[in-house]
Image: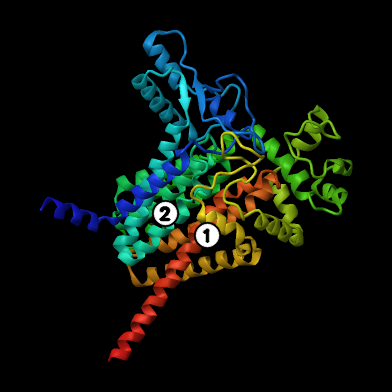
Amino acid sequence: MRFRAIKDKIAACPHVIVALACAIIVMVSTFVPEAVGPANNGDFIRVMHPNKIRYIDGNSRTMWRGYGHTPEFEMDLGHSGGVLGRAVYFLQTDFTTFNFPSSQILTIKISKFLNLGYNMITGKPLGTYNLFWLAVIHTAIFAYAIFLILGYIFRKFGFKALVFSGLVAIFILSDQGYTFYFNSFYGEALQYVTTLLVIGLLLRLEEKRNAKLLIWYYIAVYLMATSKFAWIPVGILFAAAPLGFVFIKNAGIPKKRVFILGGATIAALLIFFVFLTPSWIERDTNFNSVFNGVLRNSRTPERDLEQLGFDPKLAVLQGYEWYLDDYPVDVFSEEFNEDFFDVINKPKILMFYMRHPSRFLGILRESASHARYIRAPYLTSVQNPDRPAQQAYRFSLWESLRIKLTLFTNLWFILFILAFTAALSIVALTRTVRKHSDGEGIVLPILMLAITISAAGSFVIPYVSNGVADQAKQLYGFIGLFDILFFTLLGLVAMAIARLINCCYKRKKK
């Protein structure tokens, strides 16, 4: 009887099994037989320093283009003030050297406590910090998000749909190309898992419309949006998504509460974007977006600079990006700062592309050409590589296939998928509003539309805002959203074909 009860519970919640399987796949592929993770291109220090984590030997180990990976660091625990004083010091965030506010601060703080607890139990030096525990946090959020998404699909569309979605979760979403970043300080890991979490919570809102779940949803949106500064527009879009309930009669969620929470989250994200974006990020990306973006493939760099309002003599910087050791112009001088950095901004760059549609089409083609690899291929993932940029492909069937499928780097295919899903979502949303006054089924088309617009934005923003610098890494968010759209469409087509076959069979039987 007990075995039958367990069997019945499993049959009632098969999505739990899939979520656990995804978690096991991620942890095994990341840590067995040895830990793998992306090499540090220099970004780690941005979140390490504020969280009082440092390199064990004092070496920054900037492992750009394949020089290994170290999963272990050192936590600064403080040396005075007693237990309470050291606890306060342990929790403090130091932005004096690196001003980089991010929701990563929260997950890294939790991972510090997990490391400290593990060290106390095992007798390791208390200050030892291993990325393993941060990877555990990322994996836990990932598994819970899969649980929410698949649970909705199972209850809404049945077991067959769950089987298809479960395979997508295991072989696509759990692919090491995506989970590659879990064992690192890169913001892409939190960006990925919180995006899936937001999707799962929004779907759950359709089934269980209450204020408590709405609050958790907006907390997740804020964490997602602030995981990377470039993801804030996506967060604002998802913060607006539940406002769709406001236009539905008897939606089940107090409209006033939706307005307050949605408006407060959007306002908070705008404040974060405008006032907390570090000036050095604006400086670096503006330099890249002009000299390694607008001018990158330009045949008339001098004329382009004049149209942007700059001295054409700066054309000698064509193709240069920030963080190099030498430039033909003194880019660190006060004169350059006044003539360039004080004048340039993102709207001015965007307006340049709007005035030159052919150039805008060119950057779209450039972005499409970088959308092949899920992971940044120039960052090695093994600890002791035999060659530069060596990768570990332990569970990367989809990424390996994606690299070979030129369709996914074809601009017109990308635009077709985005346009088709947008049109499909709008049609479905219109029909749902007309047919169901209670808002039944409204969330799915709203979600699909939000994902589509987010994917379109994250396809364009990296090049416009940062040029081609590190673009293979910057397109990570777009690739994840695009794959979700592609396989959702594939699932919908399969369901439509199955219904057609079933309908024809019934007619034949009659």
Does the rendering let one see residue 454?
Answer: no
> Total marks drawn?
2
Q: Is residue 462 left or right of residue 77?
A: right
Disc 2 is placed on an element classified as helix
Cα distance, mark 1 to mark 2?
A: 22 Å
Give the numbered dot on residue 316.
none
Q: Earlier in the sequence, mark 1 or mark 2?
A: 2
Residue farthest right in this picture: 313
Q: Is residue 173 left or right of residue 211?
A: right
Q: Please tell me how crowded label 1 is: few (under 14), some (14-19), or many (20+) other residues with Cα within 10 Å.
A: many
Residue at 52% over, 50% down: 234
Q: Which residue is labeled 1 in the image?
A: 452
Q: Nearer the viewer, mark 1 or mark 2?
A: 2
Residue farthest left in this picture: 1
Q: Please tell me how crowded label 2 is: few (under 14), some (14-19), or many (20+) other residues with Cα within 10 Å.
A: some
Residue 133 locus on image (x, y percent): 42, 32
Q: Which residue is labeled 2 in the image?
A: 170
Residue at 85% over, 49% down: 301
- Out of 356 and 203, give the one closest to the viewer: 203
- Corner quadrant of residue 341: top right
Q: Amino acid at mark 2?
A: Ile
- Out of 406 and 286, give the one closest to the viewer: 406
- Corner quadrant of residue 207: bottom left
Residue 342 locus on image (x, y percent): 75, 35
